[in-house]
Image (cartoon, rainbow, N blue to C red):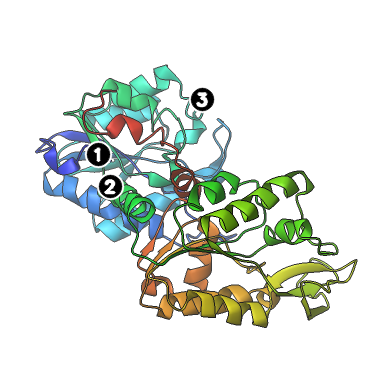
Amino acid sequence: MELLNIKNLDLAGKKVFIRCDFNVPMDEYGNISDDRRIRSALSSINYCLDQECAVILASHFGRPRGKVDEKYSLVPVARRIQHLLKREVIIAKDVIGPDAISKAAALEKSQVLLLENLRFEEGETKNDRELSEKLASMAEFYINDAFGVSHRAHASVEGITHFFDNEHKAAGFLLQKEITFFSKLINNPVRPFAAIIGGSKISGKLEALINLLPKVDKMFLGGGMAFTFLKKMGYNIGASLVEDDLLEEAGQIMEEAKRLGVKFYLPVDVIVADKFSEDAVSKIVTTQEIPNSWMGLDIGPATVRLYREGLSDVQTVLWNGPMGVYEMEKFARGSSKIANFVADSYATTVVGGGDTADLVQRIGVDDEMSFISTGGGASLELLEGKMLPGVEPLIVNKEA
């Protein structure tokens, strides 16, 4: 899949609208706790500034549901961008209101303007054509560098592309990198290729599991989703998380893995607790001996050893979803041990999904991973074999 390239645009001295993903985590005091998504957008921003462009940045933040809410203001983001760029960032007080329109019109070469939270406009998530047109009218060129939201058909992601021809729109460096990496990973991985899939539910990853099976050599499951498979195998899973309506699908996935010759790994022991709490009583049991009222919250030490052994010869690893409730220190050990092992391996290691990215950063092994995707939902949809609405209009030889 070849995308329209930012380097092929005649940007010199022009006004450019860059859709970014600045949906960053903040602590209770409004401080940005992880600015990876902001830093990831800098290469495209700096490239445009090097061309003496006037740069208009736009992003969503949180879910204000179409209403102005100070809690979701991008003012803290503007401060961080200003610090990273080492130049003034003008912030608009609205999205397409008088302040934004006048500041965008007055923006001069090498200046940077950040619009307020796009989701303050109800039309953003509804892909409203009028909103798309007003956003497009602010600039001569459109760059999508927001991989994390490119699976959404939103006004600033998909709708806006209809107002620019192929000579005036392109993918930014981050979006290009994400798509290239995942395309290679899915279509031409160095083998053996293993997928580590965790998280709480199968339902959000069912299609990804089905689409990945014919492509991988090994699949390792963890997190709450594993218990649906264990229950299908006839094990008593106690009070562990389970999706009873997906038991048949779980069985079909295991049958398909067997048919394809894919090594399919499930936990052999788990850390169980008497309640979902940091101060819960916990113990290690085999997956065949989970007490009735107890719940599995992490993979056990035997499973960690088994998974390490299975991963020892792989050349490519895709990891999406933690192995347990890593937010609670008591149930983070399994995820941490797997993360350290993956980080130390010589394999190409790709981390997809916000929770997994957060996990590897907490442990301090994020720099050891080959690639950390900035988009959880977008990376999952790529793995499901879907075309992303924000990417489709940017494919070469495909008119919007």
Element under disc 2: helix
Counting from the top left corner in percent of width and height, residue 173 is at 25, 49
Q: Which of 228 and 57 is in front in this view?
A: 228
Q: Which residue is drawn at 22% across and 33% down?
A: 396
Cα distance, mark 3 to mark 1?
Answer: 25 Å
Q: Report crowding for label 1: few under 14, some 14 to 19, many 20 or more residues within 10 A (C-alpha).
A: many
Left or right of residue 24, residue 243 in this image: right
Q: Mark 3, mark 1: which one is toward the viewer?
A: 1
- Specify the amino acid type for callout 3: Lys
Counting from the top left corner in percent of width and height, residue 24 is at 47, 54
Left or right of residue 16, residue 19 in this image: right
Cα distance, mark 2 to mark 1?
Answer: 7 Å
In the rendered image, the vertical position of residue 10 relative to residue 234, given as above or below: above
Q: In the figure, residue 146 lies in which quadrant?
A: top left
- Specify the amino acid type for callout 2: Gln
Q: Nearer the viewer, residue 269 or 89?
A: 269
Q: Report crowding for label 3: few under 14, some 14 to 19, many 20 or more residues within 10 A (C-alpha).
A: some
The residue tagged 3 is 126
Can see residue 137? yes
Q: Nearer the viewer, residue 193 or 165?
A: 193
- Specify the amino acid type for callout 1: Leu
Q: In the figure, residue 54 lies in which quadrant?
A: top left
Image quadrant containing the N terminus: top left
Image quadrant containing the C terminus: top left
- What numbered label is drawn on residue 3? 1
The residue tagged 2 is 176
